[in-house]
Amino acid sequence: MFKKDGKSKEGRGFSKEELREAALDFKKALKLGIPVDSKRRTLHEENVEALKEYVGSLKKAEPRKKREA
């Protein structure tokens, strides 16, 4: 998003519809540290693609091994 003077403005988070399209629920997104804006109602495809890409990169990362006591 751009302001009047042409500077870019960062968003506050992803909408619930965008999370739903990316197969995430609200609580899981918060646990992963993904910002969520509950007031937004819009759905932007580029945001959905960014979410899918981010979640895909998390799944590729190796899970931590548990330490033995």
Image (cartoon, rainbow, N blue to C red):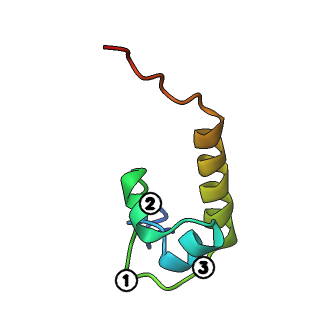
Q: Position of residue 62 (x, y in %)?
A: 59, 28
Residue behind mark 1: 39
Q: Which residue is the extreme one toward the top?
A: 69
Circles 1 and 2: CB distance less than 8 Å? no
Q: Is residue 25 above or below residue 61?
A: below
Characterize the local packing of mark 1: few (<14), some (14-19) or many (20 or more) Cα atoms within 10 angstroms: few
Q: Position of residue 69 (x, y in %)?
A: 30, 13
Residue drawn at 49 percent across, 64 percent down: 6
Q: Earlier in the sequence, mark 1 or mark 2?
A: 2
The amino acid pointed to by label 2 is Lys
Q: Position of residue 32 (x, y in %)?
A: 43, 50
Asked which secondary structure carries label 2, the reply is helix
Of tags 2 and 3, the one toward the viewer is: 2
Asked which secondary structure carries label 1, the reply is loop
Residue behind mark 2: 28
Residue drawn at 49 percent across, 86 percent down: 41
The amino acid pointed to by label 1 is Lys
Characterize the local packing of mark 3: few (<14), some (14-19) or many (20 or more) Cα atoms within 10 angstroms: some
Q: Can residue 35 be seen from the camera position used here?
A: no
- Pick the residue in front: 67 or 27: 67
- Pick the residue in front: 4 or 53: 53
